[in-house]
Amino acid sequence: MLNTKSSSPGQLGHLASVNMKALLILGLLVLSVAVQGKKFERCELARTLKKFGLAGYKGVSLANWMCLAYGESRYNTQAINYNPGSKSTDYGIFQINSKWWCNDGKTPKAVNGCGVSCSALLKDDITQAVACAKKIVSQQGITACPMFALVNIYLFGCLHFKDMGKKFERCELARTLRRFGLDGYNGVSLANWMCLIYGESRYNTQVTNYNPGSKSTDYGIFQINSKWWCNDGKTPRAVNGCGVSCSALLKDDITQAVACAKKIVSRQGITAWVAWKNNCRNRNVSSYIQGCKL
Ligand SMILES: *[C@@H]1O[C@H](CO)[C@@H](O)[C@H](O)[C@H]1NC(C)=O
């Protein structure tokens, strides 16, 4: 997961500018619905990325870039996702963020590190999107920045998904979560919790992922972060919001993991989980509990 720190409250814009923003957002929404954009075929995209020199770029293999692009956008150049927490938007095939990397003219305190218009990152021609992705990975490494937060998961999903720990069977996990009272907890349906967990850990209790940027580690089925929520004795300036040892979040018995997830969702909402934002939000998630005798 990525802890979404809420940005400081901005000044209230006057009505006209609020309306402008609303129009802009509406415009983008309409655009993203009306124009489906280029949905790359898998091997076509792999060839394109290779042509642009991404294979092995900064040590990241082509397969990993593919996995990342799949996780972020399902290979769709026109994917747009708004993040209410930071009032920023993620654009395009790599879901590049308007707070740090591109300019969409509506994101508070935006930096535009790539010196590019966000709309340019939605083009069928991915030249500029690739150039910006290269800059991001050069400056921050692959796990340091929000846009690449999913890479951990997808590295796991694609490459390193090995045998360790308890791998819940889907319906078994759904029943277990329900028993723990997660169905509807903080307004989040059981199917959404299942989707979130699938995205974070593939239902595997022993998944750990190290984030070099923050020198923290994500633990267990919910990929709970050691900087904010649990104590692993090695994360700088850790907070331990759940008052729990991180290793307790890897147990087959998920009692403590669920208790901590409840605390997180109560404080930060479900958007604290990047995997949920990217894979579950505004999607039909019913299949995650389909056919389960709950
Ligand atoms: C969601 O998908 C299921 C099939 O997986 C379908 O039965 C259901 O009607 C869909 N719901 C919506 C709101 O589209």
Image: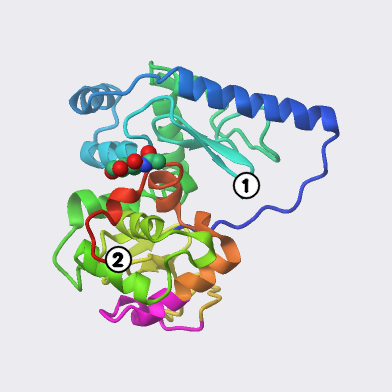
Relative depth, front residue between 170 and 25: 170
Find residue 259 and report its horizontal and vertical position in percent: 45, 78
Q: Is residue 243 left or right of residue 86?
A: left
Bin the neighbour count of mark 1 within 10 Å (Cα to Cα): few under 14, some 14-19, many 20 and up.
some
Image quarter where the C terminus lies is: bottom left
Quadrant for ligand 1 reads top left
| Residue 216 picture quarter | bottom left
Find residue 182 and report its horizontal and vertical position in percent: 43, 69
When the figure is inspected, residue 231 is found, relative to residue 68, above or below; the finding is: below
Q: Amino acid at mark 2?
A: Ala
Which of pointers 2 and 1 lies earlier in the amino acid sequence? 1
Which residue is found at the position 33% from the left and 78% from the top? 254
Check disc 1 and report its element: helix, strand or loop: loop
Which residue is found at the position 32% from the left and 23% from the top? 39
Image quarter where the N terminus lies is: bottom left
Which residue is found at the position 26% from the left and 36% from the top? 66
The answer to whether residue 107 is seen in the rendering is yes
Residue at label 2?
Answer: 174
Bin the neighbour count of mark 2 within 10 Å (Cα to Cα): few under 14, some 14-19, many 20 and up.
many
Find residue 114 and report its horizontal and vertical position in percent: 53, 30
Which residue is found at the position 38% from the left and 56% from the top? 196
Relative depth, front residue between 251 and 231: 251
Where residue 86 is drawn, which disc sits there?
Answer: 1
- What is the span of residues highlighted in magenta in the rendered image? 243-259
Give the mark toward the camera: 2 or 1.
2
